[in-house]
Amino acid sequence: MSTAVSLPINVQPWIKYTATTVGRDKVYRGIQYFSRFLAWYLLRQGATKETVARFNSLKKTLGLSRK
């Protein structure tokens, strides 16, 4: 028997925020910059080039989708 955990999370503010173009752009930009940082950090830490390429690809895709 599994018990479901019910978290009191209100998603209405998140939906309201991302429903606007400005809000959505800020979220995309934050993810894009974080993926850029993560790619740089992983490269310096010696991660595989494939892993770094995935984050660079995410950064480029988000950049294109924002335009």
Image (cartoon, grey):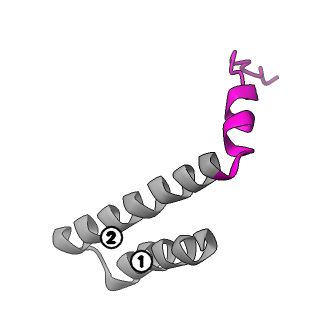
Along the line of sight, which residue is nearer the eye, 12 or 20? 20
Residue at label 2? 39
x and y percentages locating residue 5 in the rendered image: 71, 20
Residue at label 1? 56
x and y percentages locating residue 10 in the rendered image: 71, 21
x and y percentages locating residue 44 in the rendered image: 17, 71
Secondary structure under badge 2? helix
The residue located at (53%, 51%) in the rendering is 26
Q: Residues within 10 Å of mark 2 (few under 14, many from 20)?
A: many
Q: Are marks 1 and 2 in contact (CB under 8 Å)?
A: yes
Secondary structure under badge 1? helix
Q: Which of marks 2 and 1 precedes in the sequence?
A: 2
Along the line of sight, which residue is nearer the eye, 39 or 19? 19
x and y percentages locating residue 66 in the rendered image: 59, 68
User: What span is in magenta?
Assistant: 1-21
Point out the image quarter for the N terminus. top right
> Can you tell which quarter of the image residue 11 is in?
top right
Q: Amino acid at mark 1?
A: Asn
- Residue 11 counted in the magenta span: yes
Residue 60 shown left or right of residue 65 in the figure:
left
Q: Amino acid at mark 2?
A: Ala
The residue located at (39%, 76%) in the rendering is 51
Residue 11 shown left or right of residue 31 in the figure:
right
The residue located at (58%, 56%) in the rendering is 25
